[in-house]
Image (tube, rainbow, N blue to C red):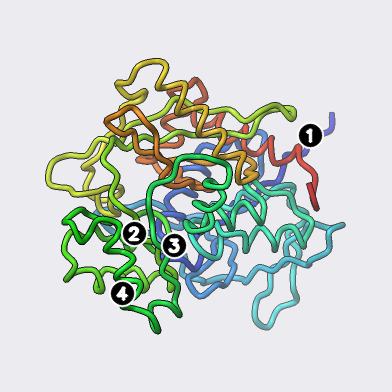
Amino acid sequence: MSQVSKTRVAVVFGGRSSEHAISCVTAGAVMAAIDRDRYEVVPIGIARDGRWVLAPADLRLAIEDGRLPEVTGSGGVLALPFDPDSRGLIVVEQGKVPQTLGDVDVVLPLLHGPYGEDGTIQGLLDLAGVRYVGAGVLASAVGMDKGFMKLVWQARGLPVGPYVLVGDREWRRERKRKIDEIKELGLADGRAVFVKPARAGSSMGISRVTDEADLEAAVDAAREHDPKVVVEAAVEGREIECGVLQGLDDGPAEASLPAEVLMAGGHDFYDFETKYLDGATSMAIPPDLPPAAIEEVRRIAVQAFDALDCEGLARVDFFHTPDGGWVLNEINTMPGFTPASAFPQMWAATGLDYPALVDRLIQTALGRSTGLR
């Protein structure tokens, strides 16, 4: 009796962004959940310098005693042949004849931030004719850039809070004018603003500013992650998140039960340490909200997903204001899958456990065509 071949899944993680370590943690959790009876996993790490390597089996992919995991770049360097008919991977080791690893059926690009979640690797995989999990080039790029994300949502009539974009040239040449614009968000009246890198996630480089004297330093801190910065007026409200999955069999996208981020005392906002290191947050799934509000946030989450022409998956973040309204904060087209991450927790509460969620993402990617869709 012939053995049925397994679907070959390349799990790509690490990357060049400041979210390198979180990508590694996500990959560790996902690879532990993949059904090895159905899927053959090829672990591919991208080092901080951009090298693709076949990751060793014993690579540490978890946060241990506050130490963050990292892809070192040691081992044979991987390359895509850019032959849409082969979908293969090639290992290139110095002084050795290149070896092929065989065809890959689908890629799970578990990369967060620039050079991964922003359409760059998606374009690379499109050129190579390889199917992959998640949003395509345009949706990934727009979802990564908080400025364009807000513009698209505004054009669709979706609720977005006040904000100011600060480009690199503007900050260098027109700093005073941009500071005056930011003051109009309420900083001049003592209200808080949040200063964020426009194309980063995991709360990297974010500052909460209540004093004008601290504004320039906050913008410079965000610019260490991205020369483009977005400054948002603080929105009074509860932080609510909702997961979205591409529909099955060309059906409409589906939203999970939402979650509320609950922070312990002593934290001003949901920063990197609060998310991943302090253990100072928990999730209420679903939040203590009326059923009508739960259905409303799920509906808007799907609208936000569709507005960007997303595929695969996304996590949509909101503020629920005291008057019962909803304000969109941002979307993550490749949300974290760490044990502390909201996305898998929300879907588990909705009836789709972790292994089933991973399987659905792979199957959805396998079912879509390569090229223009």
Q: Residue furthest left?
A: 266
Residue at mark 1: 4
Against 286, residue 77 (above or below) is: below
Numbered badge on residue 223: none
Across the whole image, how many numbered discs are drawn on residues? 4
- Graded by Cα atoms within 10 Å as few (under 14), some (14 to 19) or many (20 or more), the crowding at tag 2 reads some
Residue at 55% across / 72% down in the picture? 50
Residue at mark 3: 198
Q: Amino acid at mark 4?
A: Asp
Q: Amino acid at mark 2?
A: Leu
Distance between mark 1 and mark 4 Cα atoms: 56 Å
Between marks 1 and 2 in the image, the one whose residue lies nearer the viewer: 2
Check disc 4 and report its element: helix, strand or loop: helix
Residue at mark 2: 68
Work out whether residue 44 or residue 213 is closer to the camera in this orientation and state it.
213
Name the N-terminal-most of marks 2 and 4: 2
Check disc 2 and report its element: helix, strand or loop: loop
Residue at mark 4: 220
Q: Quadrant of residue 81?
A: bottom right
Between marks 2 and 4 in the image, the one whose residue lies nearer the viewer: 4
In the rendered image, residue 25, in percent from the top left (x then y), is placed at 42, 51
- Graded by Cα atoms within 10 Å as few (under 14), some (14 to 19) or many (20 or more), the crowding at tag 1 reads few
Q: Amino acid at mark 1?
A: Val
Q: Quadrant of residue 364?
A: top right
The answer to whether marks 1 and 4 mark residues whose Cβ atoms lie closer than 8 Å is no
